[in-house]
Amino acid sequence: MRNRVVISLAVLVSAFTFSARPHGVLATEPPKPFDLIQWNGGKFIYGVDYYPEHWNETQWENDAKMMQAAGINFVRLAEFAWVKMEPVEGKFDFAWLDRALQVLNAHGIKAVLGTPTASPPAWLYVKYPDIAAMDENGVRYRYGSRRNYCIHNPSFIAATQRIVTAMAGHYTNHPGVLGWQIDNELGDPNCYDAASRAAFQRWCRKKYKTLDTLNAAWGTIFWGHTYLAWSEIPLPWNTLGPQSLRAHNPSLALDFKRFQSESTHDYLEIQTAILRKIAPGKAITHNAMGMYDNVDYSDLHRSLDFVAWDNYPMFQKDYANYFGPGLAHDLMRGSKNNQNFMIMEQQGGLPGWNVFWGRQAAPGLYRLWAYQAVAHGADGVCYFRWRTSRYGTEQYWQGILDQDSYPNARYQAVSQTGKELQQLTDLLRDSKVVAPVALLVSPDSRWAFHIQPLGEKFNYNQQLHLYYDAFRRLGINVDVLFPQGDFSGYKVIVAPGLFVVDKPLVEKLTDYVNNGGSLILSYRSGVKDEHNVVTDQTLPGLLAELAGIAIHEFDPQTNQEQEIVTDGASFPATVWFDILEPTTAQTLATYGKGYYAGKAAVTRNSFGKGTVFYVGTEAAQDYYDRSLNWVVQQVGVARGPSLPEGVEMAVREKAGKKIIFLLNYTEKTQAVAFEQAYQNALTGETEPAQVQLPAFGVKVLTLP
Ligand code: GLA
Ligand code: GLA
């Protein structure tokens, strides 16, 4: 009886929450920003992901002691322990978790509890087999692994509400519990069962109101795909290569991406609503995945108090390539209006599942990566995981300790970092990242390029990096903006691959430039409207007037040798070539080869009080390094000192005072020359103007 009430409530909640809404518009007031350091009793959050349920209870006390000795004051617990907390439907057992918390709390360690929905118990699948996600071929996932549920399934939503309600009720007043992490790395899989299809059809109906509107927006007359009933609308194919002949209508496919992303948010909000009601006053977060883009994080994060994310720099083949994690930190910060964030899983050892992945990092890198996170705005760093598992899929995924608990070199590096960060807490408190330039990330464009990639060499994130890496090499902080963000205040906004645009976005960009901003656009911009339909205006469509160009010819011959020429220097160019005809713009670079040699490749247009650049191709990195150096000089953005390869500079600010982080990712000593001498925030000593950085070293510098 009790269950039936819960289920009907769930159906009600799902009918209410899984509905279309204008994209990017806030449905509810966002919660107030959380001051992370304040939230942890004034301490820098320094922690580990800990799984007491994987270990003998007799080990807990020693674990807590070793954590405390390493400066650890925080753990994340329980995000995969559903079966232990609800071994029988509706019967809960939190005694073990209470005991674990007691041991940890006694050593000054507080916790965030993960809601365990990423890995439901086997009994739930046996009782409700249709909670398992269905792949696009109509096959249900088998039990095992994790993230294998369907977020539109009413039984799963009911089970979610039951476990979250029980956890919230049990821990509502627990002083050792600071807050909550919702689920674990939300965003997949896409589910292709009948319930999901019905949910997509409801979403379409809510968005378009009439089938005539939907058919016109999607251009369904193409191949006679006009829908005459909502129930006819299909789900698109998911994973298709660029050459596939099974491609779906790109407009339907883009709406499906939006639907999937919004549904993920709505599933998260089912949980946050329960926690806010039953356990008010505790912070709520989620562990996001940086550059991952099956969800629009700027939408997902609006129901959270702060952003947390999982940082595994191993995805960089070269550990000295700090730009990958750097951009991911900045994008995560940008996904919630540049509020400071935390790392919920910081790589703590060599990763691996069935085999070890990649290569071992020098112990000093585990310290350096924590500092990099802090330099980019993290007020908390939590390592994954305390100790490598003896069991299951992640036996090869190293924690800080290995299975034998020996205080190894990683433990020593983590301990040193823990002590240093507590020493720096007063300095870091209330400091922020301030950036004079920004990259505009368009989730719609990213998705549209997934649906119709320009070719094998095109990569949206690579576009971001061409500009990002160039700014970073100049020692300039970079923010990441989303279309609904505040554009004012930036000297330069780069909007690479702005493929999908709508009128409101173009108006915002126009205001920004009119008021004196510099905007950099790149090839294939302004091609599509918000329905992923090609504009009938001359390219770059709604952006043509701003850019002061017309594009009547383009060349996607990605394997052709091409170059651009500017001031007598030439740079290799690849991927795509827009052949630009200036209307009001000036030519800055021309193509060097082929039948369009001498035609414009890069232009600059004066517009209002500002300037718009259009880069019609993808040039080699040194072109971006050189031209952005020139652009920042033009607009009066101060660049940093000259940085050796593999040395990063990032800056936080507090009341106008700079906190400079210099990070050396290389195996040798490096030097960075400033015009003045700074004080070392850790030693209190004055550094020479020529700062020496030991191998894998970091220095935090301030002016006295
Ligand atoms: C074939 C088909 C056409 C068109 C072209 C281009 O020739 O008959 O309908 O699709 O390919 O794809
Ligand atoms: C992700 C997950 C963790 C763990 C690590 C390592 O980040 O959130 O639970 O599985 O990967 O595989």
Image (cartoon, rainbow, N blue to C red):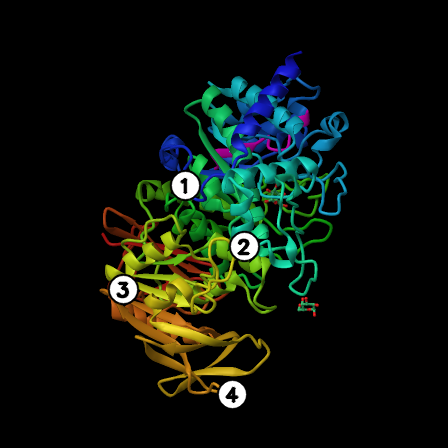
Report, in whole angstroms, how far the alpha carbon at label 3 lies from the one at label 1. Answer: 32 Å
Q: Earlier in the sequence, mark 2 or mark 1?
A: 1
Looking at the rendered structure, the secondary structure element under dot 3 is loop
Q: Position of residue 369 (x, y in %)?
A: 48, 52
Which quadrant of the figure has residue 314? Answer: bottom right
Q: Are marks 2 and 1 in contact (CB under 8 Å)?
A: no
- In depth, the one of 702 and 49 nearer the eye is 49
Report, in whole angstroms, how far the alpha carbon at label 2 lies from the one at label 3. Answer: 32 Å
Q: Is mark 1 within 8 Å of ligand 2?
A: no
Report, in whole angstroms, how far the alpha carbon at label 4 lies from the one at label 1. Answer: 47 Å
Residue denoted by label 4: 594
Q: Which residue is at 50% across, 88% downward?
A: 595
Could you tell me if residue 670 is visible in this image?
Answer: no
Looking at the rendered structure, the secondary structure element under dot 1 is loop
For disc 3, the neighbor class at 10 Å (few under 14, some 14 to 19, many from 20) is some
Say which mark, if any, is on residue 447: 2
